[in-house]
Amino acid sequence: MVIRTGLARKPWTNYETSNHIIAYLDILGAKDIICNDNNFDFLNHLNMFMEDAIEESGGGVFPREEKIYIKIFSDNILLAIELKENDEQRENKIAILFNTVANIYNEILRYGYLMRGAIVEGEFFHNDIIVYGKGLVEAVHMEEKEADVPRILVRVKVSESNSYYYLMQDADGEFFLNIFHLCNAFDDVAFKINLLELLKKHKNNEKIKAKIIWMIKYFNSWFTKYEYRIMNQQRITDEEIENALK
């Protein structure tokens, strides 16, 4: 039994935040899906998305022993990696988080979902009960108030090589994570089909439609970018968009 003593009682812990790179993600439209998930189909798909994305991120040049804190609350996903002062692994850790987030996005897009979020560097603390910190507050604010369209905003200082490989700059000057840089072969075909299906499904909702149109423009800008793709370029044409909106 805990004896309530008001201000006379002091906490026995001495927790402090530390510097992390933090990603806060939101699956768009998932709230309605969850409320109607009578067969728990979305619940199990969500678990599958995360397992597959994390497994993909643990291979290749990325060390499997790197610890990524991951917490899923409903349709929100939180990831964090601690960055120590003068961390020799800083760029590698940032790349790991970028890679994991891109894999999560690519995985859910294969199934016709969009995502919005933010990646920041800031103070963060977590244990089995609490997630806390200025960095988390900033990431949540950016996702809710600034990301707007289905992009992952990035406000982290990175090396030139990581910036070139992972980031793109939007029309408003914001940098966002280039998820398509890490997609698998033939994903572009599935992405095209899913984006057109989403557009058809939400053609009467102007707010959602604007988000999908932004994603289509991003898709076209990336998958028609390089000449070596000239024989197999995927593009969502104006005619296809018009047909989806009929």
Image (cartoon, grey):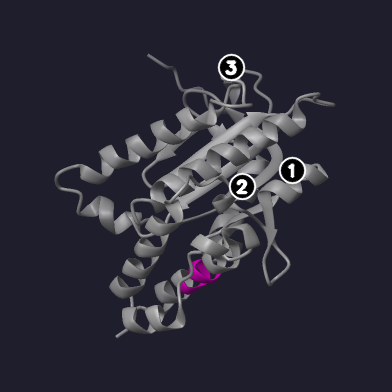
Magenta region, mostly helix, strand or loop?
helix
| Mark whose residue sits in front, 3 or 2 | 3
Give the SS element for disc 3.
loop
What residue lies at 41% left-to-right and 72% top-to-bottom? 208
Provide the residue designation for mark 1.
Answer: 162
Q: Is residue 227 positioned above or below 154 on the image?
A: below
Label of residue 137 in the image: 2
- Residue 211, position in %: x, y? 47, 70
Cα separation between marks 1 and 2: 25 Å
Q: Nearer the viewer, residue 235 or 156?
A: 235
Q: Which residues are magenta?
A: 213-217
User: Is residue 244 located in the magenta-colored stretch of the structure?
Assistant: no
Q: CA distance from mark 3 to mark 2?
A: 28 Å
Q: Residue at x 56, y 56 (%)?
A: 143
Q: In the current view of this chain or complex, which residue is farthest to the left?
A: 39
Q: Is residue 59 above or below residue 25?
A: above
Residue 65 circle label: 3
Which one is in front in this view, the residue at disc 1 or the one at disc 3? 1
Residue 241, compared with residue 160, is above or below; it is: below
Disc 2 is placed on an element classified as: helix
At x 56%, y 27%, the residue is 68
